Amino acid sequence: MKKATQLLYLSLILSLLMTSCNTSAPKTESNNSLESFLKDYNTEYVKLITQSSEASWAVNTKIVEGDSTNAIASKKAEEAFAKFTGKQSTVEMAQKFLKEEKNLTEIQTKQLKKIIYLAGNNPEAVKDIVAKRIVAETKQTETLFGFQYMLNNKKTTTNYIDSVLSNSNDLALRMKAWESSKEVGKVLGSGLENLQKLRNETVKGLGYSDFFNYQVSDYGMTTEEMMKMNEQFIKEVWPMYRELHTYARYELAKRYKVKEVPDLIPAHWLTNRWGQQWQSMITVKGLNLDSILAKKSPDWIVKKGEEFYVSLGYPKLPSTFWEKSSLYPVPASATYKKNNHASAWHINLDQDVRSLMSVEPNQEWYETVNHELGHIYYYLSYSNKDVPFLLREGANRAYHEAFGTMIGLVAMQKPFLAKNGILPKDAKSDEMQELLKQAMQFIPFIPFSSGTMTHFEHDLYANNLPKSEYNSKWYEYVKKYQGIVPPNERNNSYCDAATKTHINDDAAQYYDYAISQILLFQVHHHIATKILKQDPHNTLYYGSKEAGDFLRSIMVYGGSRDWRVLLKEKLGEDLTAKPMLEYFAPLMEYLKKENKGRKYTLPESI
């Protein structure tokens, strides 16, 4: 019996070994097949995205009326990228590999899911619709940035319009400037209607309900979850926004010598074309940076931005950045125009990084430069061998904007300005006014981004908002969430929403910016209190290698880690508006005192 048992035991062992061999071989073969699939995909992906980025760069940096050369090249590159990413056989292969997700690494899983997500915007099954959408998007971009703005029957630029809204107290001139800024919407409305249809039809080819739902899915969230989160952001900042709104109504009425304070703010009273940020209405004595920076050159501002990042331990910008970027305004004598919206570009998902700006020596561009270079250094940080090309992006789309805006914020704090030689070390200023100026920048942005923009684009795609309601729906949300009204009748022959570039060329993603604002105060609070041991309102990041190391410890992973896990690991908490509210808490008592006896016109809660 013992011998029989031993024979049976040996038989079982042999059987298990054979089974083990039979099952391990396919797994190894499958893994090799997966790695080969991902390697081939990444190789072709970076090749095509480089071609597409180069073509798009040309479209945005050299717009020549009547010359469609760049547009044709961009269309061709976009079509090639769309054909590759939307290939049905590739999607099916990725889906097949994902069935064994439990045996895959996190990076393998993320790449496969990214392949399917990319296909959602360009599915082969609706390739004719994809081709039409690409043509429509290129045409919309050219129309927007090739538009000739006019003011008092003279050619003008958006930079000049913005300077009028920031500096002029002449309400008649302000009205004309604001109206001029909206004229481009008239010629964009039909294009937006076409894009609305084409974008929705495109993503339905892979099972998404609509384009808004498709874009939200990149966060691993549903549409309902995203809308709920943004509505929560608005509720949390509303008490502060209500105070700022009341304060702004009365102070602006005083500035423009208007005796009867309006219940809602006329749009042309504000310093921003969309009322999204109001900081230009506040001048802090001792911090008149425009007059100081006017003595500097645009090149000095950009170089100072690079110098700051180098002080944190980042490398100097690649020489190609300086050779290939478009950093300054187009000369008046030029025969072409360019996109006037600041942006950062990762052309080849490696070292070819560029920025498109129109830098002038003023406070807004000083802050913008530091912001845009934040994107550039994020690109460079995750361009390493451990991050596949497919995952060379932010941990989620908001991370990029959070880091850029955070650096813009700290670059405006007095210790940093003194270190940069912009302010004397002993410069005195009203710190409450400084905080008020910052609040005017960050707080109004939440009702605009989480409220007006997100709800309008949700309706545009998820609810198929008809063109006949574009303008009325836009101003319905502007009134509800921002407490702002247009200065005159804006019927539906206008399309003022489309004057915001993101509606056209970065569609259904504006909640990225709202999330980034919340995230930036979380990260800043951590660095200020845990690393620098400083007051978050008066920090000096400059020269802190430890602060730089912390930032890089997040940046270096790109999109290869789950954004929620990474946040919890680095900050010890989930996404929360608490640090943002804490930062501006000292301002509430001041505002309540200033607003005593004034009429509040926004509801106490929303």
Image (cartoon, rainbow, N blue to C red):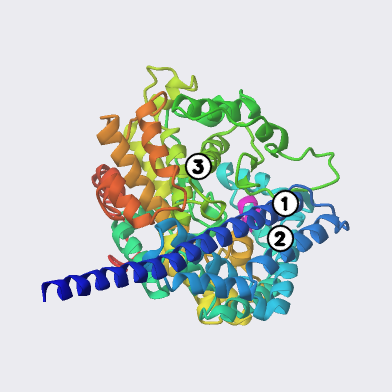
Q: In which quarter of the image is residue 298?
A: top right
Disc 1 marks which residue?
60
Q: Is the magenta stretch mostly helix, strand or loop?
A: helix
Residue 592 placement (x, y as % from top left):
26, 50
The amino acid sitting under disc 2 is Thr
Q: Residue furthest left?
A: 1
Query: CA–CA distance between discs 1 and 3?
Result: 22 Å
Work out whether mark 1 precedes mark 3 in sequence or the reverse, and give the earlier one. 1
| Residue under the image location 44 percent in, 33 percent down | 412
Q: In which quarter of the image is the C terminus?
A: bottom left
Query: CA–CA distance between discs 2 and 3?
Result: 26 Å
The amino acid sitting under disc 3 is Tyr
Disc 2 marks which residue?
141
Q: Is residue 176 in the magenta section?
A: yes
> Is there a contact, CB below 8 Å, between mark 1 and mark 2?
yes
- Asked if residue 482 shows in the view, the reply is no
Q: Which mark is residue 378?
A: 3
Dot 1, how many residues are within 10 Å of its Cα: few (below 14), some (14-19), or many (20+)?
many
The amino acid sitting under disc 1 is Asn
- The vertical placement of 398 against 137, above or below, is above
Q: Residue furthest right?
A: 66
> What residue range appears in magenta?
173-178
596 horizontally vs 332: left or right? left
Work out whether mark 1 precedes mark 2 in sequence or the reverse, and give the earlier one. 1
